[in-house]
Amino acid sequence: MPHQTIIPILFTLVILLLFKSPPPAAAAAAAAGGCYTSIFSFGDSISDTGNFIATGAYNPICNSPYAEGAGLPYLAPYLQGEKKHQDFKKGINFAVVGATALKTDFFQSKGITLPMTNYSLSIQLQWFKQLLPSLCSSDSECKNMIGNALFLMGGIGGNDYYNAFIDGRSVEEIRTFVPFVINAISSAITAVIELGARTLLVPGGVAFGCIPGYLDLYQSSNPEDYDQETGCIKWLNEFSEFHDSLLRNELELLQQLHPHATIIYAGYYEAMVAILQSPEQYGFESPLVACCGNGGYYNYNKSCVCGEVCSTVCNDPSKHFSWDGLHLTEAAYKIIATSLIQGKYTSPPITHTCFLGTNIEQFSSTFSM
């Protein structure tokens, strides 16, 4: 059945607006100014533009992104590009659906099975290092290329927790995973900075308590478990806040250790919650109900996920915040991306690190077309 493939929060954004020499399809954005010559992205399904498909694994979400439907290019997936001998000099996407920040052996030691993939953040970083010699021919050329690139370090970490939650582990146990996840992200950031990275965008976690898949898993008859304003599960969002708190503390430490680099925190959680506090302002109806699914209060059924023949799709995805119960709709991602680039939920604001002299209003207008 036809269904919407997830477009990553930041890809249409960065491809459209951040290249110093934008491809033809992004020419309209050139007037808004560019910042980077290439983009290197690591992460999971929020960022994957085809790596999971290239592995040959089956999943109902296995369709190419719809970025081209909007006339936009998207970052070449590493695993597909290797087969096609694709030019990676404008950027590469190493993200894979189901990827975790932590290595497989961490979960094996806990008795937790990873159902999707074992392409952890460290493996993605290894791919990048292996590819570097084909992108630049000398140390100075590599330093220049990496120094003028934007590195998207995630989103990553959500699957580390999701796999534990669906395995029935308690939130108390899963909280003990968080320092390890943060350390894995920190190690990857340090590694690319040591290779010459100067600008890194590091997303925080999503609002787990507002995701239909989690809302379905942890339905409660106790109204005190829910935030009265948004309908999200409070203790799950508190878990998200705990992850983000540790991440931000680590990023502050890394910034002090590497003052020549700019490490930007992107608050996905804050951006999501802001929308859900006033969903009607953004044209969303029933924001906690998935557009594509198979019934239930939140239209999420893990036994029949979006894309399978047993699932159905809403008439107008643009009026829904959640696409498949685990990921957001393109409409929601677009709003979040715009708010991030305007500096509302980034620290330091991207407007201070990239778009100096850029007409932000023109930027927003271009992106909203």
Image: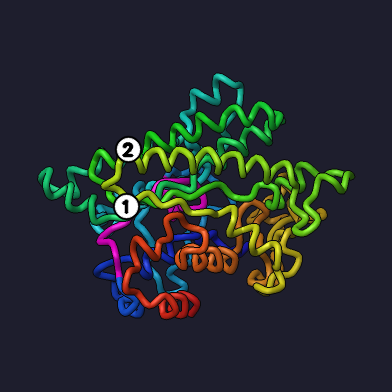
Neighbour tally class for label 2: few under 14, some 14-19, many 20 plus, Cα within 10 Å: few
Q: Residue at x 71, y 56 (%)?
A: 293
Q: Is residue 266 left or right of residue 2?
A: left
The mark closer to the camera, 2 or 1, is 2
Query: Is residue 50 inside the magenta stretch?
Result: yes
The foreground one among 189 and 264 is 264
Q: Residue furthest top?
A: 109
Which residue is labeled 2 in the image? 257
Q: Is residue 221 left or right of residue 215?
A: right
Which residue is labeled 1 in the image? 199
| Residue 340, x across and y down, in percent | 49, 62
Q: Secondary structure at mark 2?
A: helix
User: Which of the two labelled residues, at mark 2 and mark 1, occupies the earlier sequence position?
Assistant: 1
Q: CA distance from mark 2 to mark 1?
A: 14 Å
| Residue 54, x across and y down, in percent | 41, 47
| Residue 267, x across and y down, in percent | 53, 54
Residue type highlighted by circle 2: Leu
Residue type highlighted by circle 1: Thr
